[in-house]
Amino acid sequence: MHYLDNAATTRVSDAAADAADRVLRQHFANPSSLYRIGALAEDVIEMAREDVADSLGAKPSEIVFTGSGTEGDNMAIFGACHARRAWADHIVVTGYEHPAVQNAVSALEKDGWRVSVIAPDETGHVDGAAIAAAVTGKTALAAFMHVNNEVGTVLDVARIAAAVKQKNSRTAVHVDGVQAWGKVPIKLAGTAIDTYAVSGHKIHAPKGVGALYIRSGFHMDKFLCGGAQENGRRPGTQNTAFIAAMAAAIREMQADRTRAARVDKLAKMLREELKALDFVTLNSPEDAACGLVNFSVADIKSETMLHFLESKEICVSSGSACSKGEASHTLTAMGLAKSRIDTAIRVSFSGENTEEDAAALIAALNEGRATLARIRRR
């Protein structure tokens, strides 16, 4: 099988699986318990907190464990806006956010918040200066992705955050870092970023665990009600095993010094091969990151091509897995023609992929185009 949908989820690494298995068997106690085995479980969480903090250039006390990137995004967005409701009524967001951010902001808009949307251009790039320019004295929140999950464009989030704060120091800055974590270096200490959400299953950890960076001293309301876990930020008994697995995964990602270069090489190789196909149009820009390559296959609907590729044991997608087959929100925001949106394919490499995977995809695209075109002519 050629698995090329790593932006949707990644294979759980052996290191992450082993960490989860060890903790499930040895550290099953509730980490909030006062007896010794509970304290040992808490130690596992605190060591993991240090690993996650180190990967983000943050302090361990600034890391809150969550159940997903979506939960982290929601905690940050609702928490920041509700805390600023007394003086603010405005939000600034980019036009190609993940549904976790897009739908949270839409819910606030229905509740009376004004929303300014900064759309990407046709190459998938967003003007960072335009984000800051849209901030006013009543802007509670500016939210933007670090790396877009469909086309791979990268924002200079530290620079944009600084510009936002210069415009209004009380505006909260939230970054969805789910696709960037472990792939695009970030040191949050010293930046103007207030919150930064990450997810385990994008870095070869299990699904159902994530983390939210909350800058020391940043004011936000609680999103959930319950116990005092995670310093009162996120109630509910922690998933100790998966937290340990996520820490093992990010350690492994950081230790693999050649991973980023391998992924970039594969993405570049695929882009060059795709350029040679007269029935393909690239949607991702040349500077796309994290092994993401988005392209359209002329006259062949995405779903049709996906099923053909699956028959060749090649797994790709047509966009965000969270959109459940709906037309690509990102490509629509970019203003691309409906024909390109309806025929779009997203490929996303990980450090486990090889040149054989890319070559298999090119061969299958050629075969699929010829086969499906013949069927259409009948």
Image: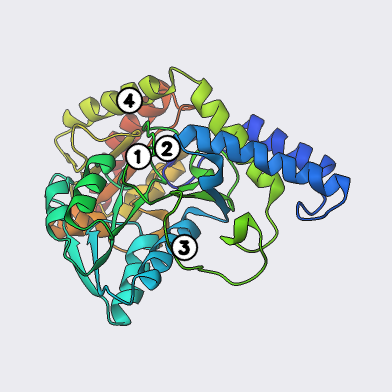
Residue 273 position in % (x across, y down): 23, 26
Q: CA distance from mark 4 to mark 3?
A: 33 Å
Q: Earlier in the sequence, mark 1 or mark 4?
A: 4
Res 152 seen here: no
Give the secondary structure at mark 1: strand
* In this view, the mark in front (4 or 2): 4
Q: Residues within 10 Å of mark 1 (few under 14, many from 20)?
A: many
Tell me the residue that label 2 is attached to: 4
What's under tag 3, amino acid-wise? Met
Q: CA distance from mark 1 to mark 4?
A: 13 Å
Position of 169 compared to 225: left or right? left
Callout 4–callout 2 Cβ contact below 8 Å: no
Q: CA distance from mark 4 to mark 2?
A: 14 Å
Q: Earlier in the sequence, mark 3 or mark 1?
A: 3
Q: Residues within 10 Å of mark 3 (few under 14, many from 20)?
A: many
Tell me the residue that label 1 is attached to: 347
Tell me the residue that label 4 is attached to: 264
What's under tag 1, amino acid-wise? Val
Q: Earlier in the sequence, mark 4 or mark 3?
A: 3
Q: Residue at x 57, y 34 (%)?
A: 51
Position of 222 compared to 122: left or right? right
What's under tag 2, amino acid-wise? Leu
Callout 4–callout 3 Cβ contact below 8 Å: no
Residue 143 position in % (x across, y down): 30, 57
Tell me the residue that label 3 is attached to: 75
In the image, 106 versus 81, the foreground residue is 81
Give the secondary structure at mark 3: helix
Q: CA distance from mark 2 to mark 3?
A: 30 Å
Q: CA distance from mark 3 to mark 1?
A: 30 Å
Q: Earlier in the sequence, mark 2 or mark 3?
A: 2
Does 22 sit above or below residue 175?
above
